[in-house]
Image (cartoon, grey):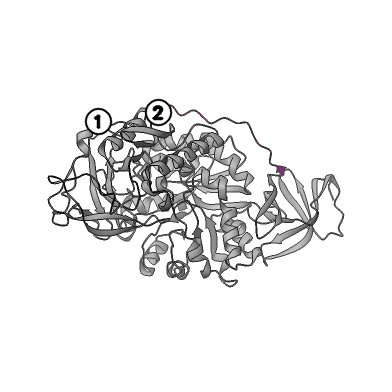
Amino acid sequence: MTKIDLCLQNAKILNVFNRTFELKTVGITNGVITQVEAPSVHLDADQYQDLSGNYLVPGFIDAHMHIESAMVAPSELGKVLLQHGETSIVADPHEIANVCGVPGINYMLRDAKQTPLDIFYMLPSSVPCTTISHNGASLPAVALKPLYQREGVHGLAEVMDYPAVESQQADTMQKIHDAQAAGYHADGHGAGLTYDQLQVFKRAGISNDHECTTLQEAQDRLNAGLNVFLREGSVERDLENTIGIVTEANAQRFSFCTDDKTISDILNEGAIDRNIRLAIKAGINPATAYTMASYNAAQAQQLTAKGAIVAGGDADLVVISDLAEVTIEKTMKAGQWIQMSESKTTPFNRQTVHHHFKLKDLVLRLASETCNVIGVKPNHIETEHLQCEVPLENGEFTGDTIQDILKIVVVERHHELGTSSVGLVKGFSIKNGAVATTIAHDDHNIVAVGTDDASIYAAIMRITETNGGIAVAQNGTVIADMPLTIAGLMSDKPYAEAAADLNHLFEAYQVIADKQSLAFDPFITLSFLTLPVIPTIKMTDQGLYDFEQGTFIGITCREPVGASTK
C-alpha cells in the first residue's frame, strides 16, 4: 500500500450508515480519506496522530443559511464557523441580491474564496420576493442562468412564491428547470403551506423545506417526500418544537440548519453544534444527531464527497471529547487542522442607501381608535394579527407605552421612490427611544420602531449617514450604532469587533426598553416584520400587508384596503 500523509489512530469514528461509533484507524492523503481500517491494521504514513479515544465525526454542514444574517462578511464568518466544527455551509445570498443584484452575488463569491470553509451558494430564486416589492434589483431566470457556470454555485435557493409555483408561472418554473438542467436542484420555503400545497412544491421539483415550526408541519413535509431541515436560528428557534418528529426509522430525512443567526449568537451559543446539543438533550441518539448534522445534510444538498468518514470522502473532520456537550477539540478541513487565518474582508464599494424621508412623514393620522396591530411573537418570524383600541391626540397616534403599542415605519431606500408607511406594532417593550435598521427582509428597506418621532428619525438618519446599519436612539439622540457598510447588511470589521458592536446595541436597547421583557433578539425580530411571505401581517413601504388575504389592509379597521399606503 502506498504511504499516506496522515494516520489518525485510536479514534471512535462515527459510522453514519448504521449510526454507531466504532474504534477505527483513518488514513488521509491530499485532503481525502484513503482508508478506514480496524485498529489492528497498520497504515504506512508520514505522520501519526493519536486521538486518545476521542470521537471523530464528519464536519458539520449547515443545510440552509444566510451569511448576511450573521452581519459579517463570508470570510469572517468562516473563521468562526470552523471553530464550531462546521466545514461546509449551503448559503442563499438572497439578502444582498435583493439590495444590489448580481454584483452582490459576485461580492459573496469573491469574498468566500478567502476562507477554507466550503460555501456552496444557491442562487436566489425570489428577487424580488413578491410582485409588490420595492427592493433594489430584479433577477429573472435569464439573469440567473449564466451564474450556474460560476465556481461556488450549487443550485437554486429557497423558492418561496407558492402562487407562482401553483400557477406554473413561466419565470419561476424556468428557474427550477435551469437549476436541474445544470445538474443541481431547488430548495423550498413553504412557510404556512398545507400538506396538499407542499405536494405542489414536490411535483415542481423542489426537494426540501426548512419552514416547519410544529410537529404537524414537520410531519406534513416528511409525508410530502421532502428533506426537512430542522431550524434553530436567532429568531426562528424551532428545533425544540420539532425534534420530536425524528425517529430511528425516519431520521435519514432530517438535517439541521440555522437560516438566520447573528454573529453574537454564534459566538455565545454556537451554530449547528447548538442544534446537535439540543437534539441530544431532547433524547435523540447522539450518533443520529451527528449524522443529521453531516451525512444527512450532504445527501439532501447533493454534496457527494461530504458527510461520511469513508474512503474517497473529503477529509473534513471534527474531534469531539464530549458527545452530549459537543465539545470540539479541533477541526480538520481538507486534511489540515484548522488554524486561525489573518485574511481581510473584501472591500465593498457601493452606496446602497438613498431616500428623502422627512420627520413630518412620521405623522400617523387615524380615522378610528380601533386598529390593526402587528403582534410580535418572541423567537418566531410569524406575527399575530391583533385588533386593538389605541389612544389618539387630535386624531394622531403618538405612542402607547402602557399597552406597548408603538409606531413602526418602513422607508424605501434603493431607488429614492419616496414611498414610506407608518403602522402599529406591539411587543418591543420600548419605554423611551427607537431602533432603526437597513436589515428588513426581504426587500431590505429601512425599518424602525419607537416611542417618539424625534428618536425614530434620529436613528433613521444615522443609518443613512453610515450607508446602512442599526442604530438605537433616545430623546432624539443616537446612543449606539453598528455601521453595516456592506449593502446595509454586513459589517466590514473583523468578527470580534462586529460582535462587540452588536453587543453595544443590546446594551443600548436595555436602556430604552423594559429590561425584564428582553426575551428575544429585538433587532432581527424587527427585520422580519417587513417580510410579506410569512404569516400573518407585515409592514412594507407601501402599507400594511395581510398574508392570509394576500392584499394590503388599512391601519384602522374602518379604512378601505390599501388606505395606509403613503
Q: Which residue is mark 1?
A: 356
Label 2: how many Cα within 10 Å (few below 14, some 14–19, many 20+): few
Q: In terms of image quadrants, where is residue 365?
A: top left
Q: Main secondary structure of the magenta part?
A: loop
N-term mark: 1 or 2: 2
Where, quadrant-wise, is the C terminus in this rendering? top left
Q: Point out residue 534 in the picture as x, y percentages from the top left corner.
A: 34, 55
Residue 115 within the segment the image draws in magenta: no
Residue drawn at x 32%, y 31% as measured from the top left? 461
Amino acid type, callout 2: Arg
Q: In terms of image quadrants, where is residue 113?
A: top right
Which segment is the magenta one? 334-349
Label 1: how many Cα within 10 Å (few below 14, some 14–19, many 20+): few
Amino acid type, callout 1: His
Q: Is residue 14 visible?
A: yes
Say which element carries label 2: loop
Residue 339 within the segment the image draws in magenta: yes
Q: Which residue is mark 2?
A: 350
Residue 304 versus residue 462 in the image, above or below:
below
Residue drawn at x 61%, y 64% as measured from the top left? 280
